[in-house]
Image: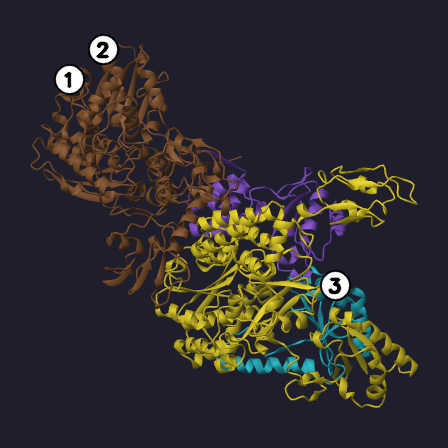
Amino acid sequence: MATIKLSESQLNFIKDVCKAHGNKGGEVINVLHKVQGEFGYLPKEVQEVVALELNIPVSRVYGIVSFYSFFTMTPKGEHPISVCLGTACYVRGAEKVLDEIKRQLGINVGDVTPDGKFSLTVLRCVGACGLAPVIEVGDKVYGRMTPDLVKDVIAEYK
Amino acid sequence: MHVLCCGGTGCHASASAQIIENFKRILAEKGLQDEVQVIQTGCFGFCEKGPIVKIMPDNTFYTQVKPEDVEKIVNEHIIKGRKVTDLLYMDPENQEHVSDSKHMGFYRKQLRIALRNCGFVNPENIDECIARGGYEGLGKCLTEMTPQQVIDEVTKSGLRGRGGAGFPTGVKWGLCAKNKCDEMYVICNADEGDPGAFMDRSIMEGDPHSIVEAMAICGYAIGATHGLVYIRAEYPLAIHRLQVAIAQAREYGLLGEDIMGTGFNFDIELRYGAGAFVCGEETALIHSMEGKRGEPTLKPPFPAVSGYMAKPSNVNNVETFANVPIIITKGADWFQTIGSEKSKGTKVFALAGQINNVGLIEVPMGTTLRDIIFEIGGGIKGGRQFKAVQTGGPSGGCLTTKHLDTPIDYDSLVAAGSMMGSGGMVVMDETSCMVAIAKFYLEFTCEESCGKCSPCRVGNKRMLEILEKITDGRGTMEDLQELRNLAAVIKDTALCGLGQTSPNPVLSTLDNFWDEYVEHVVDKKCRAGVCKKLMRYEIDREKCIGCGKCAKNCPAEAISKTNYIAEGHKLPSMEIDPAKCIKCGACMSGCKFNAISVK
Amino acid sequence: MINVTIDNKHIQVEPGTTILKAARQAGINIPTLCYFELAGMKFENKPGGCRVCVVEVVKDFNGKPRRNLAPACATDCVEGMEVLTHSPRVINARKTVLELILSDHPNDCLQCEKSGDCELQALAIRLGVRDIPFKGVQSTYRKDSTLSVRRDMDKCVMCRRCETMCNNIQSVGALSAVNRGFSAVVAPAFEQNLGDSSCVNCGQCVQVCPVGALSLVDNIGDVMAAINDPKKTVVVQTAPAVRVALGEEFGMEPGTIVTGKMAAALREIGFDYVFDTDWSADLTIMEEGTELLGRVKKVLNGEKAALPLFTSCCPGWVSFYEKNFPDLLDYPSTAKSPQQMFGAVAKNFFAQKIGVKREDMVVVSIMPCLAKKSECARDEFKVNGNPDVDYSLTTRELAHLIKQCNVDLNNLEPTDFDSPLGQSTGAAVIFGATGGVMEAAVRTAYEVYTGKPLANINLEVVRGLEGTKEATVDFNGLPVHVGVCYGLANARKMMEEVRNGNPRGFHFIEVMACPGGCIGGAGQPFHHGNSDIIRKRMEATYREDAGKPIRKSHENPDIIAIYKEYYGEPCGHLSHEQLHTHYFDRSEHVEVK
Amino acid sequence: MAKVKSLAELKAMREKLQTGLDLREKSNDPDSLVQIKVAMATCGIAAGAKQVMEHLMEKADELKLAVVFTQTGCMGYCHAEPTIEVRVPGRDPLVFGHVDNKRADEILTKYVMNNEMVEGIIPVNYETIG
């Protein structure tokens, strides 16, 4: 089977997280949350280490990572942009905002800009429906978005 | 003295601006501009009787005020101190005029039970919570009631699960309590995945202690010492506030060992969801907490028999729990007086969409949609026409004008082809295409389907494909028939609640907006102008001055010059090649001469 | 007992009986797809996912009709329940569900390995599907193959049987459901090649797959080419479990023994020498038994030796412990499996004897097994790149081959195997069933150790379809503690026990990867979850043993002869060279960058 | 903090805490504290509630106003975020919506200091059980 390559500090981080959760297979989702929090995403190697440390098949880890939309195997951009496509945002024109972001960045949902600055994802409802349509850049929420405002928001991060 | 004039959009449309103007003018004429201040306020939530004018400090409440009434109010009320009786609100029951809004029970359509502390207390301060009676319900249970009495009280209150299907909460607790076991779990379902719903988030952010308290009460009732909250990882603030609340409760001895000196132990841990709508289904939620894929399993066995770690578990959602402490302190008899015959208490709705007062509201069960949308919600944004209201999220349906006067509770919503769901309520106007809305929800379900059972995995995909065909202008009448058959079979055969209810948005729009489907299929037309493939951008050659800006803006190079020069213009007009047009609208938004329209 | 009414038939069933089973009791056969059970063998897969078995509950526990249709496979009967299995509502739903499944299926039945044996195809026939009204995108996945197993997940119906088998029964954990919704499929981690996963090629996923999503790697073409190559001498060996199952492919009752007909058919097909893996099974007993006694004696003398000794004839099992128990590589017997012993003998001793160069000899094995295809390709079983066993065909492939060659197996006159690698004992025959290797080894080891004849050579305690068995055999005052298990999850438990100090004090443990041993192998005719078929194959195995004139390996004259003529003694120098192997750490490692 | 040892103790504690709060809220003493609650649920924060709260605090300092600021949960007026509730002793509490820096200043200088109404009032349109 494959040999996993990670830096020592990365490896130790994962090991510590797993240990903090008692190296129990049932804790895999909690472990993945913490590990993704650290690495930003869950590459293959990381999942393999998690599987080994929790003594569960790596197929199960991947089965979980590929099931839950919160987990991702692709690295995000420096400023990850998420467009809310919840119903409230949808009926208030979120798709037009999304189209404009796609156009401005020249990327599709799930992609990262070539310079690594921005990545684009969609999500379902951040619970800020009062401000619909809503987008998030990193942790910052921008409410009452319109296609016209997209340029300004992106400019903040350029 | 203050004159408060409703500036809510509903009232605004009915001339509140003119009323304010008149007040200011007349008061100035009388030299009262410094004594009496005229202020425009937000919506009073009573738009049916708008515009509203309220005189402070005596709280006189004038309804249906017309601009010409202003003079009378100034002369009579402000100068002479006499109320203008015919503008006062008339109580429909006893036909008496009521002047003080505080005495107008009818006016207050909202009753906050689950949200009783939201916006009142500092959620990160347990003292404020205790000051408002927090943890007294728990104290009462632990010192004055047996677990069975607690269950009986909750059963008697008629409280039903607020997460969707409305199963009686007390009965659920009782079923779980029957399966006594060394380890049992109280689980709070805080995986609010319904797009357009944020009730649970708001409660956890605004009043986390009520959840902590209720879970402990439930633990006492069923005999569990462990509590678990399954909360969306996308709710960092709610997570934080819950963590703070749990820590404070522990510090005060309201969680942990020997709570309030009664020997009862109970503690709560958080578990994080990871973005799967299906995990709102209790068996899927439990599997997710166990570190598995969030796939539902068949019931029975119910969680009450074999839940988390195969131990008896009781799962309730956030809003359900938020009702529990107050039922204990105020009693089931009190709770029973609120709501409709079969659905007791109140329901929190997240009012969103094309409505003026987007917000979180709580109304007694049995309130009509009309009251919610046109009173509390302040009506439709921009004065447009109400078209539909979607309740119950992807499991619910789209209701229309004919349902506006239905008193809403669990059963009436199901009868109308929708469902309560968790309480998302998205209002739509004529700019929403109902076929596209059905497609939107089905896209959601397809994305969120776990893939375990074939009707949901493949069936919903096929339904979505048929809807895509229709919105692309390739639909046939047979497709509509097939949609109905598929919807019926999926409802009948899918494994879990998500699958069984997934056809509801399609079925309800087919039922309520059949004409719109037929229009898409037969006339190839989308009246809301949403379905791009059915749209056609056109340049009015008489209006076009030939500046060419549209051609520059067009990303598809679909616009070119014609030979036609309109009268008074110097350059030939432009035209759009429909075959190349991608319907992005860039041409239209850039045209300063309103020469481009969409058909 | 509770009373239920199914299709207006009143019946009484035990509490806890599902509607499906109750209906079967009443002679009503509700169709299923994802549901799979090996009764009595602790394998059950009932995710309730396909929804083909839905029925209408017109009266439920509360006296009211149930709102939705219920999956018969996973719904328990309750007192007074009334069920309809073919009402118009049920038929429409069942057919629509099937059409939906078919709408995401390639429907290339004519070219599919599973055609004729496919449960989905059978359902489509049964429900009279004539048209698939739903047109839409179909799932497409990268096709992938190990040396044993082919995956074509375009055909997957998400029954999850393979996943259950791989995880619950085998604890291999190579397969898991991945993704969700329409993209959900069963796959190895990262949807990488199965060969790069923890897969041990036991092939049980193929055995339980209802459709052609998982199938075997077909080597019929290679074998035909070798037979038709005049330069090649083609030698064939047939495993013990094949002869009790092959007949099923020709319409015979399960448990029919076709040893002689099979040998005759192989000759008809054109193999130059028709030998028997049973012969090398006897050889295995000599080597492994000697090894066991050697280790036991060492321990008795206070020396260190790895006990218990684990059998090593099952390649799925060998691969499993190399991947999962690299710290215990000293424990399994170093004796090669019968297939590989045969190959080694054939390409050394026999090739020499008949004056054929190694490169010009092609050794083909007929196995009940998919893992054997991977085993024969292992580097350690090659000399200068030339494998001891060139191709391994399964029982099912042999059946195809026989049919392709127009051989009428049913009417063939039985013949014997060729000499000198054809004669075998009853001890070798029972290698095919779980516990058989153990029993065969005891028959020989006892007599070698004690020098006395074994009073009762039928070691009944290790027979039968129990997943794990143990017994103590008195070796003239020395209590020898033996264990037997099949299914790799059971094996994992035993290995972990050994890792934790072998508290039960086992001396010898037999492990087979497949349910019931090789008779339930992945290369056998599909049993479709009917464990009676496996049971009948087992009974046939012991019948064949009982009918053999010689039933102990060390009494096989050809075995005695080869030691005399060639190997000298068991575990001697030459046999170590040719008949023993060594194991490798194939576990996953973490390496720091 | 000592642990709550009984229901009686909890009730006593409530009395004490409530009196404290009531004193703060209902006192007619003009010198007693003004209380401003800022709705800080996700919606509010996204609409700028944190920044408004900071601004209000600075401004109150500057004006030498004794104001207690607390955060609270969603008041339900998502359409008018950020929203704040202002309780001046002796007056009914008032909720203001769409509070930006400019409006925040007005609320302090006009409403709190001079009891002048300012734009942005949101009438409380619900009843709460206490």
Q: Earlier in the sequence, mark 2 or mark 1?
A: 2
**Quadrant of res C80:** bottom left
Helix, strand or loop for disc 3? helix
Tell me how many marks there are: 3
Q: Position of C534 compared to B312: left or right?
A: left
Alpha carbon of mark 2 to alpha carbon of mark 1: how far?
Answer: 18 Å
- Give the colour of chain C: brown
Q: What residue did someone put label 3 on?
A: B382
The x and y percentages for residue B596 are 80, 47
Can you give x and y, in whole percent of width and height, for residue C263 in the image?
20, 23
Q: Name the chain letter of the residue that bears numbered label 3.
A: B
- Chain ID, mark 2: C
Mark 3 residue crowding within 10 angstroms, few (<14) / some (14–19) / many (20+):
few
| In the rendered image, the vertical position of residue B149 relative to residue C184, given as above or below | below
Residue position for label 1 = C564
Crowding near the residue tagged with mark 2, few <14, some 14–19, many ≥20 C-alpha atoms within 10 Å: few
Question: What is the crowding at mark 1: few (fewer than 14 residues within 10 Å), some, or many (at least 20)?
Answer: few
Residue located at (43% from left, 34% from top): C152
